[in-house]
Image (tube, rainbow, N blue to C red):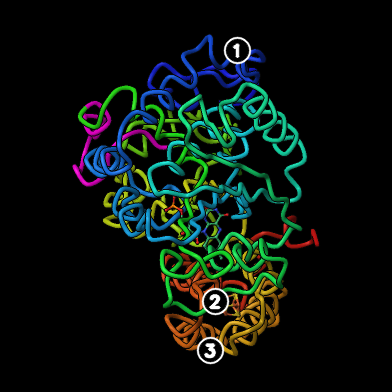
Amino acid sequence: MGYPHKSHPRETPLLTRYFGEEEARTLDGWKKRGGYQALEKALVMTPAEIVDIVKESGLRGRGGAGFPTGMKWSFMKPGDGKPHYLCCNADESEPGTFKDREVMRWTPHALVEGCAIGAYAIGAETTYIYIRGEFTEPLIWMDRAIREAYDAGILGANAMGTGKRIEMYVHKGAGAYICGEETALMNSLEGQRGNPRIKPPFPAVSGVFGQPTTINNVETLAAVPEIIMKGAAWYKSMSLSNLKSTGTKLYSVCGNIRYPGTYEVEMGFPFGEFLHELCGGALDGRKLKAVIPGGASVPIQTMAEADATLMDYEGFVAQGSMLGSGGVIVIDDKQSMVRVIARLARFFAHESCAQCTQCREGTAWTTKILERIRDGQGTMEDLDTLLDLADLMTGTTICVLSDSCAVPVVSGIKKFRAEFEALIHGKRVHPVLSAVA
Ligand SMILES: Cc1cc2nc3c(=O)[nH]c(=O)nc-3n(C[C@H](O)[C@H](O)[C@H](O)COP(=O)(O)O)c2cc1C
Ligand code: SF4
């Protein structure tokens, strides 16, 4: 975690093991560490064999939804006479999430290699790596890595001398959170406004430029070379709790915690030990109060729930939340939950693309009401209105940004109602913080 990177002895560093090593950023340094052997191995396999290994490994999408990667790849039909595309989603705009940024900063060739294997497996001649515009340093490293790979004949019309074509481009986003949603990303790539599209058709049928497309997260693709080199059984064996969750997972940890940073642990690691031991627990004189474990879009956990969680897709759900993007936001007893939730709502209202009425109006009204409560002007009726709004905003829109705004509101009111009521009844529980704009 952090820089210079030093893993905690209880981490399992696979994707993070070269973080902080300057030399690993270059092609020569990457090759010294075994880089591009997985691509070499993959290019003499059939695409179907690669898809089968990834399926067998149990790898699931690390972008938030946890969809099985091998299954997603099997929806593509190489050889159907159409152009095919792979899009690597490096938009990473979810609040509290910065693990993909670190992969691109420290091991850009791991991502190039993962993308190249993925592209070959799904029959995509062209890969776009869509990077959020604010990621100025990762953009430089990814550009450089792709250029080095082209110059060395790893990419191009005759990738690694195999006669196979693998083209790769970096596309710079312009700072909109919504462009991380896969169909908005595709519109943005095409030069259109980054609005999500109605599904179906799904990207594997009609994606970028109306052609079959697969979208995968940075961390998902960066894990693929490891799986190709060491095998599906090895990857699958990294599972401490539920066999449906395999491998390692990166977490970006921020907020009121002693050691913020990027961590990598096996699926099923105990969250309580992760927070208190690896991340160092609360700051001096403070107590942890709540955790948002998977980026701003997942339900807030109480500390009792967090301490009982096993960190995998099923474990977070069992304790009232979701794994999401792995962006862990820690909140201590000096913070007002109402302030935190109002701040999140304002973010979603700002980022709504405004196509859907429930989202456009719902995120705006949710923010207005929450800020009214935060400022001591709320009523008990406001709490019912917020919950009614959240209901209307869930499952009714083109994409799930609307649902994402409702999620912290509903979990916040359910689990921390006393803080809302205290503000409504005129008790300024956090006088210092509520004075900060
Ligand atoms: C509003 C919104 C923002 C999203 N932002 C990202 C993002 O920044 N990065 C990402 O990988 N996935 C993001 N996703 C999820 C993508 O739509 C998609 O599911 C993911 O990139 C698929 O990759 P995976 O299968 O490897 O997880 C977002 C989804 C929504 C609804
Ligand atoms: S839910 Fe919101 S962000 Fe998503 S398409 Fe509708 S208006 Fe746009």
Give the number of callouts: 3
Q: Is residue 215 left or right of residue 147?
A: left
Type of residue at label 3? Thr
Which numbered dot is residue 197? Answer: 2
Return the x and y of residue 379 as percentages of the image width and height.
60, 86
Q: Which residue is mark 3?
A: 385
Type of residue at label 2? Arg
Q: Is residue 17 above or below residue 387?
A: above
Residue found at x 35% / y 52%: 73
Q: Is residue 189 above or below residue 18?
A: below
Query: Is residue 1 rendered magenta in the image?
Result: no
**Gap between marks 2 and 3 measured at Cα:** 29 Å
Q: Is residue 215 above or below residue 271?
A: below
The secondary structure type at the circle numbered 2 is loop
Q: Which residue is mark 1?
A: 29
**Gap between marks 2 and 1 measured at Cα:** 41 Å
- Rendered image quadrant of residue 154: top right
Type of residue at label 1? Gly
Q: Quadrant of the N terminus?
A: top right
